[in-house]
Amino acid sequence: MLGRTTERTAQRLPAEVWVLVVASFIIAIGFGIVAPALPIFADSFGVGSTAVALVISSFAVVRILFAPVSAKLVTRFGEPKTYIAGIVIVALGTAACGFAVTYWQLLFLRAFSGIGSTMFTVASVGLLIRITPPAQRGQATGLWSTGFLLGNIFGPIIGAALVGVSVQLPFVSYAAALLVAATFVWWFLRKSTLAALDTSARPESPVTVRQALRNSSYRAALASNFANGWAVFGLRVSMVPLFVEKALHGSPEMGGISMSVFAVGNVCTLMVSGKLSDRIGRKPLGIAGLAISAAGTLWFGFSTTVPVFLVASFVAGLGAGLLNPPQNAVVADVIGPKGKGGPLLATFQVIADLGAIVGPLLAGLLADNFSYTTAFTVTSGIMVVALLMWITMPETLVKESTTAETVAVESGTLDEGPEVPTGERVAGRPRQPEA
């Protein structure tokens, strides 16, 4: 009986992880709410398509430029403060966007919001990595990604309804959702010793980006994240709707349906991949995810009917869901259980953003000068390159015995002096017996 209880306790994620998962869901719903309104609001100023696209891309560009600064903020002030400050910045910038009276005001405020976005993204992933035991990082990142994914599914539905009432309403609603998320995180983490661990314990010497780039596992994770940003966050949004309408002669609604089908495939594998990557290793799941994603993306270009394309979308979604948790866990393993990984996480984020910007541009040129099939084939080839790097990299999952000792030390259950912890953790704090 005791053995079973101990096993269940060991498998329980820290409460702080669930706080971040819930917050990611709230933030993603808000992001989805504003997504349908932003291009419509920008177009209302009487500008062209290029100017509308500039408003959307400015957010990603500023995320890339400010990522190194975000890493330094995390190192100096810690993840929780940087996380909350970033959310508040995005909330203020987004709310102000809704009241912009000129195009240039909207452009500036949207770009300003990108500063806060990169702050809370780097901080949230860094905090998630630091508070999660190494043997549960795949599961934790899978949960966290699922929260974002589900929010992005339901958010646009709500946003479309709000746009019908007022084009400014989604911006205010997103700002309100962000403030709710910031308050939620602050309230539940304000007394957590686990979240504040770095202020009371001497961290390991931080791994620099130059050192990490010598690690083939980190390079493989960067390659797969670039390919994922190119295909999932760039190409899927920019080219798939056009491909469905122009090449397959489907309705505009079918482009949105294909994205939902992709998301369903993603949900089906995210949680499974997270748990399996903690049991059998990061490599098998990462390799499988990249192989399936590459096959699904290649299938896009050779689809001749909408139903076939929907099946390919589901397959590509399965692959993306398999890939996400292990590649995040690899970065966490490279950083180490006590290291500060702000610069490594910022670089990891920048690579995905670069893929999301460069991918659609190059794929668009290929589609215009050659064919959609060529564009999807090249995108699949980018994934194959990352796949080869994953095949040759070493496994990064730590052994169970080493993990148990590390977690025990971090939890304050070894060498604590006269106090004898019960082993039960409440929001990151060992509960001590009554005196």
Image (cartoon, rainbow, N blue to C red):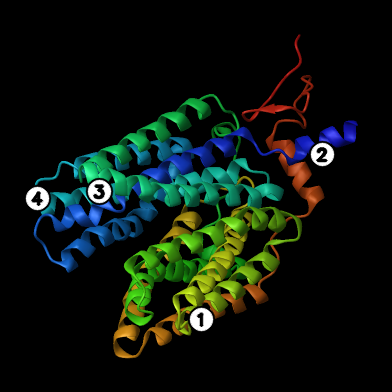
Which mark's residue is nearer the viewer, 3 or 4? Answer: 4
Which mark's residue is nearer the viewer, 1 or 2? Answer: 1
Residue 183 vs 171, above or below: the answer is: above
Looking at the image, is mark 2 or mark 4 earlier in the sequence? 2
How many callouts does the rendering have?
4
Secondary structure state at the residue bearing disc 4: loop
Q: CA distance from mark 3 to mark 4?
A: 16 Å
Callouts 1 and 4 close, C-beta under 8 Å: no
Amino acid tagged 4: Thr
374 sits left or right of 47 in the view: right
Q: CA distance from mark 1 to mark 2?
A: 43 Å
219 sits left or right of 246 in the view: right
Residue 352 vs 158, above or below: the answer is: below
Residue drawn at x 45%, y 83% as measured from the top left: 304
Q: Which residue is mark 2?
A: 7
Q: Residues within 10 Å of mark 1 (few under 14, many from 20)?
A: many
Q: Which residue is mark 1?
A: 298
Residue drawn at x 32%, y 79% as measured from the top left: 246
Amino acid tagged 1: Leu
Callouts 3 and 1 close, C-beta under 8 Å: no
Callouts 3 and 4 close, C-beta under 8 Å: no
Amino acid tagged 2: Glu
Callouts 3 and 2 close, C-beta under 8 Å: no
Q: CA distance from mark 3 to mark 1?
A: 37 Å
Which mark's residue is nearer the viewer, 3 or 1? Answer: 1
Looking at the image, is mark 3 or mark 1 earlier in the sequence? 3
Residue 102 appearing in the image: yes
